[in-house]
Amino acid sequence: MNLPETNTSLFKRLRFILVETSRSGNIGAVARAMKTMGFSELVLVNPRFSDALTDPEAVAFASGAQDILAGARIVGSIAEALEGCNYAAAVSARLREFSPPVMAPRALATQLAASTDLHAAVIFGNERFGLPNEIVEQCNVLINIPANPEYSSLNLSQAAQVVAYECRMAALEVSAAAPAANPIGFHGDAASLAQVDGMYAHLEQALVAIGFLDADNPKKLMPRLKRLFSRTGLETEEVNILRGIARHILAVAKK
């Protein structure tokens, strides 16, 4: 069963991002995992070798998914990788004290399939070190695969396969149900990740200006605020309102 390709299809709205991958074979294996589940958009952030997409090991492990490798992009930062996305999910086995809300892959897949305004990315870290905290804190959710607690070691492509499978099943389920869109009530556009990051920077400036945040000793205030806002699903107009508040605070503080 194949889902018809439409602009709102999750197969066209979901991006897989690999950060600082060390083994070219893992990149090829992720491409294969993606293609078997119907996904095609792959972005690499600073892979550890220059020929990451053409290395013979990557091609061999792709095993028929060379078109995914051919269409993949290599970028120099997570900001570049997330351009055009308004939702990001960090995949990690390691839980953080100040991480975004934690979700299982199935819950994430259900949310993404049902919310056709979300252009999402799932982000996977380096094989050995995983994802750095600064990337995790930029994300809306932290995805934790509920594996055997006595042996929870999944390799990169296995983790990607689990996420891709759950997203495929959720997309097919939504397609089969095909509920009519609800025209009642206002539904704003989801804010992009770049817009949300800009809001955080603006808000931080305002909090420093009024002395609520000590720039030399910020502690965990901003991570806590990011965690708070990540639970809300901010819309573009809401981000603009918060930036307007920050702008007014800065103007008053200068007087």
Image: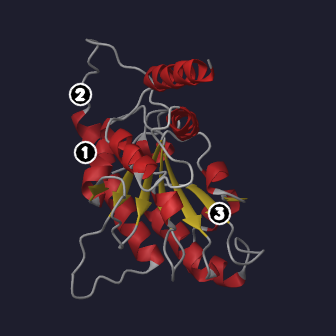
Indicate the amino acid at tag 3: Val
* Inter-mark Cα distance, 3 to 2: 37 Å
Total marks drawn?
A: 3
Q: In which quarter of the image is residue 164?
A: bottom left
Q: Closer to the camera, 2 or 177? A: 177
Q: Closer to the camera, 144 or 1? A: 144
Asked if 226 appears above or below 143 in the picture, the reply is: above
Which residue in the structure is indicated by mark 2? 179
Q: Say left or right for 134 vs 102.
A: right
- What is the number of the mark on residue 45? 3
Q: Say left or right for 136 vs 174.
A: right
| Image quadrant containing the C terminus | top right
- The answer to whether one can see residue 79 in this image is yes
Secondary structure under the numbered disc 1 in the rendered image: helix
On the image, the x and y values in percent for residue 195 come to 56, 33
Residue shown at the point (29%, 68%) measured from the top left: 145
Residue shown at the point (28%, 56%) measured from the top left: 103
Kindly check if marks 1 and 3 are in contact, taking CB atoms under 8 A apart as contact: no
On the image, the x and y values in percent for residue 192 come to 53, 35
On the image, the x and y values in percent for residue 158 come to 40, 75
| Mark sitting earlier along the chain (3/2) | 3
Furthest residue toward right: 50
- What is the number of the mark on residue 173? 1
| Mark sitting earlier along the chain (1/3) | 3
